[in-house]
Image: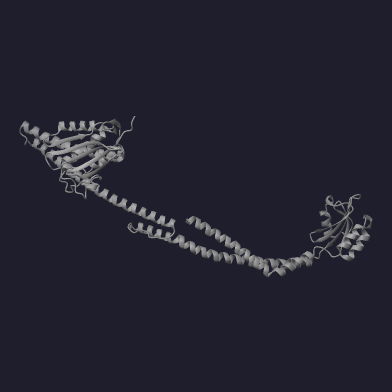
């Protein structure tokens, strides 16, 4: 059962037990004060009707409007006041204040004609006879003694007050006991995991992200603590990743400074040689200038890679997809590179299946992939000639490109990181490079909806996958 349902059930139980306790207290008090309450109400009931009421009814029933004085004399001994009332005014008889109020309250519309009626009005027993011919009423009333009524009400009020005090006290005590019990129980359920979470938050604020929260109890709070631990691990992993990225950036800046300094120094040296007259012949000056120009080309390539990397990272590199046959396109790329590269230093071996399905490809970005793979093999193979085997084949879901060189490969402990930003297996930086080439390849492949992975197979083998284009 969920915590929400248990809390609802507990609250309902508190309410039910409170009401049950209230009823029990009321029942107990009623039992204890039953006789006293009964006597008080019986006394009050007796004060409502006078014992001489039957005689009063008989006298009024036989009286007429001319007999008011006689009727008044007969009623006086039994405690009744008599009056003749017409249109809320006393025409004859008693003019007592209580009788005046009774005359104003009397409504003849609801009285029976020429018949005596008996009713109780406030603290008075009233006998009325309505005579329609004269539009008048003969009224006799017995008003209860005020002192007796006050005394009775006073005693009843005191008894009721004590009853209410006892009931209230009982209810408060019971509710306090129940609330104390259930509050302590809920505190154990709710506060314990909250305290653990607070301790965990304090540890995080102090920089301790390696210690998990350990809590076993309610499922909801266990899930909350597990989520908190997961968040803590995510923050820790992000911190470590940021530290690695920052270190990689520092290494990149250091490496770029080193890689730029070499061609820049070369350019300065050859230009100075021309200025100082060291290159004293036209052939020698031409050689110096050519070498300086080649150094500027190296610098330009390095800066272009960094510029492309920056555009990729910021999302400013556009992708324009077209349907192509990967086999034909790769074959064209190989032919173009073979025309400008020395065959004694580089050899391509191309293999492909026939009738491959088309893929969606950005031609310019794929050229960047091809050049980065080629440059990576040329730099780190360390053999001559560099032999690159390229194979294009079809799988159930993708069209794959396999790139394999004849170099020494990559140490197994480093092969999983060669696609990271700014990562270089050559920590000593004997080879020029920015450490972003394979990262850019991976980024472009993923933008195409594919993936790339590396393995050692008598050299470094890279496998690139491209999703098949939907049939038109």
Q: How many marks?
A: 0
Q: Residue at x 58, y 67 (%)?
A: 173
Is residue 134 left or right of 334 when viewed as pictured?
Answer: right
Residue 162 visible (yes or no) = no
Q: Quadrant of the C terminus?
A: top left
**Coloured how?**
one colour
Compare residues 107 and 406 and report the one nearer the observer: 406
**Residue 415 percent coordinates (x, y):** 22, 47
Question: Which residue is outermost to the top?
Answer: 472
Where, by quadrant of the figure, is residue 466 drawn?
Answer: top left
Is residue 278 left or right of 68 when viewed as pictured?
Answer: left
Compare residues 461 and 195 and report the one nearer the observer: 461
Q: Height in image: 336 above or below 20?
A: above
Q: Residue at x 78, y 67 (%)?
A: 148
**Residue 247 percent coordinates (x, y):** 24, 49
Q: Height in image: 62 above or below 446?
A: below
Residue 240 visible (yes or no) = yes
Is residue 275 left or right of 87 when viewed as pictured?
Answer: left
**Residue 152 percent coordinates (x, y):** 75, 67
Q: Residue at x 12, y 40 (%)?
A: 266
**Residue 461 percent coordinates (x, y):** 20, 42
Compare residues 376 and 206 and report the one nearer the observer: 376
């Amino acid at each position: 059962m969920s915590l929400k349902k248990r809390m609802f059930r507990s609250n309902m139980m508190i309410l039910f037990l409170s009401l049950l306790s209230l009823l029990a207290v009321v029942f107990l008090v009623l039992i204890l004060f039953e006789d006293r309450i009964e006597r008080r109400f019986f006394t009050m009931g007796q004060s409502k009707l006078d014992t001489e009421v039957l005689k009063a009814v008989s006298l009024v029933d036989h009286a007429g409007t001319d007999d008011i004085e006689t009727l008044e004399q007969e009623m006086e001994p039994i405690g009744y006041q008599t009056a003749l009332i017409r249109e809320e005014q006393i025409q004859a008889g008693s003019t007592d204040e209580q009788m005046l109020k009774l005359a104003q309250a009397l409504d003849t519309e609801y009285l029976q004609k020429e018949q005596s009626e008996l009713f109780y009005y406030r603290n008075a027993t009233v006998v009325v006879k309505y005579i329609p011919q004269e539009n008048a009423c003969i009224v006799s009333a017995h008003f209860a003694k005020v002192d007796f009524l006050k005394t009775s009400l006073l005693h009843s009020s005191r008894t009721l007050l004590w009853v209410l005090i006892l009931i209230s006290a009982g209810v408060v005590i019971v509710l306090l006991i129940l609330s104390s019990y259930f509050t302590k129980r809920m505190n154990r359920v709710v506060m314990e995991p909250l305290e653990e979470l607070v301790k965990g938050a304090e540890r995080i604020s102090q920089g301790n992200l390696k210690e998990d929260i350990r809590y076993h109890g309610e499922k909801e709070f266990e899930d909350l603590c597990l989520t908190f631990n997961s968040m803590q691990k995510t923050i820790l992993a992000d911190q470590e990743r940021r530290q690695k990225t920052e270190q990689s950036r520092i290494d990149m800046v250091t490496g770029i400074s080193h890689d730029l300094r070499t061609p820049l120094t070369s350019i300065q040296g050859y230009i100075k040689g021309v200025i100082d007259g060291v290159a004293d012949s036209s052939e020698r000056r031409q050689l110096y200038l050519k070498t300086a120009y080649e150094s500027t080309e190296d610098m330009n390539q390095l800066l272009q890679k960094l510029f492309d990397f920056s555009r990729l990272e910021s999302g400013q590199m556009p992708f324009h997809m077209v349907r192509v046959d990967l086999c034909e396109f790769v074959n064209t790329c190989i032919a173009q590179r073979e025309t400008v590269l020395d065959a004694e230093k580089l050899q391509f071996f191309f293999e492909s299946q026939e009738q491959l399905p088309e893929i969606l490809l950005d031609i310019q970005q794929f050229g960047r992939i091809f050049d980065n793979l080629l440059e990576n093999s040329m730099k780190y193979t360390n053999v001559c000639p560099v032999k690159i085997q390229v194979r294009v084949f079809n799988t159930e879901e993708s069209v794959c490109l396999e790139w394999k060189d004849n170099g020494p490969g990559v140490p197994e402990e480093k092969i999983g990181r060669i696609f990271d930003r700014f990562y270089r297996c050559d920590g000593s930086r004997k080879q020029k490079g920015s450490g972003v080439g394979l990262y850019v390849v991976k980024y472009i492949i993923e933008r195409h909806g594919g993936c790339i992975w590396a393995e050692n197979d008598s050299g470094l083998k890279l496998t690139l996958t491209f999703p098949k284009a939907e049939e038109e």
